[in-house]
Amino acid sequence: MSTPRIVIIGAGFAGIEVARGLGRFGLKVTLIDRQNHHLFQPLLYQVATAALSPADIAEPIRKMLRREPSVEVILGEVTSIDPKARTVALGGGRSIAYDILVLATGATHGYFGHDEWEGAAPGLKTIEDARRIRSRLLLAFERAEMSEDLAEQKRLMTIAVIGGGPTGVELAGSIAELARYTLSKDFHRIRAETATVLLLEAAPRILNAFPESLAAYATRKLARLGVTVRTNSPVESIAAHKIVVGGEEIGTGLTIWAAGVSASPLARMLGVALDRAGRVAVNGDLSVQGLDGVYALGDIAVALDADGKPLPGLAQVAKQEGVYLGHALARKITRGETPKPFVFHNRGNTAIIGRHAAVFDFGWTRMRGWIAWMFWALIHVYLLVGFEHRLLVAIQWLWRYATYERGSRLIAEQETDG
């Protein structure tokens, strides 16, 4: 029996774990990603708010898989998938045949039908996104410092974060801390600590996936940091320097989108039914319903838990799915074993609010305050790839805690104002 040709698209948490699992069995795998690095997305907001540099949360894919010689890594962008011919086409005209295809391409920003908002309200999914947000954020304060107009200063120092999920909460809290504790010491004409940070949520409360008590705690802590939390406040329009919320026009120096995501557009290439977020339905073994030899996992897939509810788009879900599928496929190919259905083990849902303030929901128990913050920090340092990353990030966090300083306050791009 010939060894099947296995192609994995995407080197996020899910794709990397599948490649590792198959590689440990010596199976030949082709892993395709349009970036040469794996990104630790849970800490991406810290790059966007000048707390960490991109190199702290990224690792070369080839380095991560150097112990798996049977795994081939290709830097390229998939332009089409032909499930009937079982081929994947890359830019430049290259085509790769497969017997087994694993789709682990994650998600991108979702603007609820208003894609025109993207230019004025960047989302946060890639290092490029984080650099763009960091540059626009710091540039807003620089322009406020140069302005003689008090109204213009106020607009420039008004930062709106749209979406009250964990990403929005973490961004808002981190921006408020940056302005209050760091930038306030750097600027002399403006009072950076008076910056207005808005967290806008269309639902009745923030952190909808968390118990109400933890959401209420997060709201109080954000308020103490100076964040204005507005619930029941869907955004009606977004332009370069303003947003409209509930009929009210608000001038902004920066607007950040953290309200919605959409599955990778590669899902549409499979020719199967998709849900409203563009995700594909999968069976218990993570195989795509209606397609033979195709698997999907992570944010691009709708996998159900034991109660029949869709699993959340979390890093821990993607990682566990990747570990499962890597081992399940390896045993199926080498031993002929029929995989048991994937079972998700909840390790807890968390969000950091600010300095020694976080919330943690384990389902069976809840945690908040500095204990939750310490637990969050330990887990995120542990999950970072490579000892050097863990050490550097731990040292930087200790330095920030002691001094309130942030060392990555670089403006990587200059934009015209208009």
Image: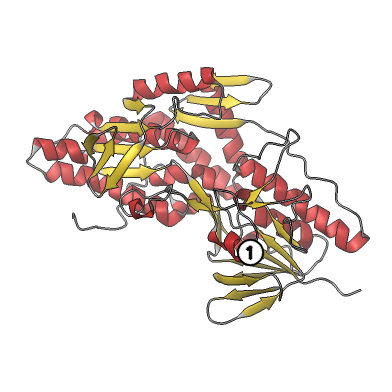
Q: Residue furthest bottom?
A: 93
Quarter of the image for residue 28 reads bottom right
Quarter of the image for residue 62 reads bottom right
How many residues crowd around disc 1 within 10 Å: few (fewer than 14), some, or many (20 or more)? few
Above or below residue 47? Residue 418 is: below
Q: Which residue is mark 1?
A: 271
Above or below residue 409? Residue 330 is: below
Residue at x 61%, y 59% (from the top left corner): 11
Residue at x 60%, y 31% (from the top left corner): 349
Where residue 382 appears, as percent x and y from the top left, is 62, 40
Using the image as rendered, state which of residue 21 and residue 97 is in the foreground. 97
Where residue 6 appears, as percent x and y from the top left, is 75, 68
Using the image as rendered, state which of residue 115 and residue 324 is in the foreground. 115
Question: Residue 241 vs residue 87: left or right?
Answer: left
Where residue 418 appears, as percent x and y from the top left, is 18, 55
Above or below residue 380? Residue 97 is: below
